[in-house]
Amino acid sequence: MEAVLPQIKPKRKWKKRALWIGAILVFLLLAVWLASTIYLNRLLPQTEGEISLPGLTERVTVTRDASGVPHIKANNEHDLYLAQGYIQAQDRLFQMDLSRRQASGQLSEVIGDKVLNNDKFFLTLGLRRAAEASYDQYTDSGKATLDYFAEGVNLYMEQVRENGKWPIEFTLLSYEPEPWTPVDSLTIGKYMAFDLGGNWESQAFRQYLLENFPEDKAYDLFPDYPKGSPYIIGKESLDIDKSFANAVIPHEYNGSNNWVVSGSKTKSGKPLLADDPHLGLATPSVWYQMHLENPNVNVSGVIFAGVPGIILGHNETIAWGVTNTGPDVQDLYIEKRNPANAAEFSYQDKWEAAEIIKEPIKVKDGKTIDYEVMVTRHGPVISEFAGKSGKDTVLALRWTALDPSAELEAILNMNKAGNWAEFEQALLKFETPAQNFVFASSDGTIAYKANGSIPIRKKGDSLLPVPGWTDEYEWTGFIPFDELPKVVNPAEGFISTANNKVISDEYPYHISNDWAQPYRQMRIQEVLQTNNKLTAKDMQNLQMDKKNLQGKEFAPQLVQVLNGSVKKEDQQVLDILDKWDFIDSEDQAAPLVFNLWMQNIAEVLFVKQIPEETLALFQGKRQAVDELLRRALGGNEGPWMKDNGGLEKVLSESFQKTVTNIKEMQGSDPADWQWGDYHQLSFSHPLSSVSPLNYLFNKEGSIPVGGSNVTVQAAAFKSDGIVNHGGSWRFVIDIENMKQAYHLVGPGQSGNVKSKWYHDQMTSWAKGTYHVTQLEKVNGKVLTLTPAGED
């Protein structure tokens, strides 16, 4: 019987078929890529040639230089600010709309119910209500500027509505923006007061500590500023964890660096000024760089997208910059509710009716939600935005930013100031957020002022929530303008700020309980004190400085405690730290070990005992950990150390956790570890969290970067290592030449994904490559805006 062999089918047909399928797939992918590229390119705004704009009275030229910075030249203020609104909308319309929606509590209308708690929180705060109340604080001139700017934004929206060239984000979210109003610009300004922080979270957290831990353990985490660190100038029961489980918490110490150096310490003999505000790092940048010129003003710098004028920068005779002062401008008041009427609260032995404000929330693909905000005499009740948290007491927020104010008027006046006296006069109307202003002028003056509304309290120091049913804890006013901390032409020849403690305890007014860790300020002063021939390049290098003085203070001591007590294979890691030069360089292993170790020390100390949502309210956590370590290393272990087994056990457990984490990420050989393999810059777009949109909007991927939370080159990072907070704009100017300055706006000027200015400054941000912006003789693409009907 013959064997039956299995039939073998020829492979050639399958190979041929596979090749054809592969070729078709490649063709389809190329076709999709080509079609999407053509479509996205079609959406780019016109940046050269001529555009006719109704409402213009005369021609306006807009020259975009090599970095995409628009230089707007007009013959009058109406045309200047109209053009500013139009040009901002060309590059940042989606960001502008998202910003006003975020601050106004209107995101759910275009995104859906997943952001409902976000909207409830901002509607409760009432930033838009505060902006509406602020409008009447403006002069006729200020109101006119807001109107001109809004007119320009709306002209651009009308054009894209006619030609269907909405930025791609609007198409993806299936909506068109509403017309722009002056209140929208003011609301964005109020949001920046929120983003630059307050102190209510700290008060709520301390209240939680006192209610849940023994007194000595609670007080162990109360603020304590390190002795010898530099100044700029010489039980009520509350359900805290439930009340704020969904609160929107700004990044801790949304701060900055700035400094100004007198001509006596510079190579040019004229002052130098440097500023780098630390805010979220995203696409697009929070800042938009512009140059505005008409017969009354010639000013260059940055502004928030959606706002007219220039908030930071220089004109032909002065330059200025800011950091966050961080004062206690908020108080939580404990309000006693009437058991018979939930809308009444006790005050001076009488029941007072709260104001009930209806704030309906439109929800995309859902029903409109009837939402109400309750406002007591002290402010909005913020402890119940996510639901009822207690029947007897609530927490209401008193905050300077909820008062009517006219910061934009101050900005417009600052833009036109010609000397320190005029600039300080302009600051009168800059009430919130309180900022550390540094100043330099062509006459050689350097100056500093902690400016803004800082409350004077009848009683209390803003450490904890206070009784709202009595007048004992009311605000009695604000620190007088002429008594705010100020320095002009100091003998030291420089002034620097880095969100550190402003002034000594001899100052008669309370400013704050919480200050940033002092390491950035210490490093800035260390460099400025030792050099008398400083240049603009030196200032850029200092802004990019990666020296970690926290590491210098703690790393040797931590290594000494554990030396010889760890596993043999882990001793190599301690040896790496022992040889560290304290530079947070992206190509070293030591910064990776130290920075993660400090995070894990905090985790070992707190995570098992404090819920995650409540721990988010702990705004001074890093400072508290520093102080707990200082005491313990000095032989004084506090209750948090003792309850976790003592200093050596805390360090050992957190060290082992750190080593295990790094091995999982970067392998078992410490010789291969690098800070930059974990610590990376991405500038994420708000829609990039939805896959596969990340490939469209985050097209440059991630870049290894040095620095950390405590270095002058600020580069704070999330738990996955992504750098999401730092110098959102870097600025240096030598007053010898007021016609130019050095800038960095990461990741770029444009919010349009196909623009060449979309991510062109991303690598520059990581490497510290600045571009020069001129006030005259500007080269680039020229767009002429002409009055409608002009030939």
Image (cartoon, helix red, strand yellow):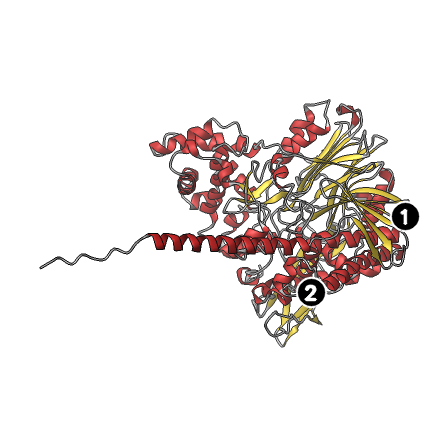
* Furthest residue toward bottom: 340
Mark 1 and mark 2 residues within 8 Å of each other at the beta carbon? no
- Which residue position is annotated with label 1? 75
Camera-nearest residue between 650 and 787: 787
Look at the picture and state if 521 lies above or below 96.
above
- Which residue position is annotated with label 2? 176
* Furthest residue toward left: 1
Q: Can residue 138 be seen in this snapshot?
A: no
Q: Which mark is residue 164?
A: none
- In primary-sequence order, the first of circles 1 and 2 is 1
Instruction: Characterize the local packing of mark 1: few (<14), some (14-19) or many (20 or more) Cα atoms within 10 angstroms.
Output: some
Q: CA distance from mark 1 to mark 2?
A: 33 Å
Q: Residue at x 63, y 57 (%)?
A: 465
Look at the picture and state if 307 lies above or below 756.
below
Q: Kindly indicate the quadrant of the structure image that contains residue 97.
A: bottom right
Q: Can residue 644 be seen in this snapshot?
A: yes
Q: Residue at x 69, y 44 (%)?
A: 324
Q: Position of residue 225 (x, y in %)?
A: 61, 40
Camera-nearest residue between 722 and 291: 291
Image quarter in which the N terminus is found: bottom left
Camera-nearest residue between 347 and 152: 152
Query: Label 1 sits on what residue type?
Result: Asn
Q: Residue at x 50, y 47 (%)?
A: 719
Query: Label 2 sits on what residue type?
Result: Glu
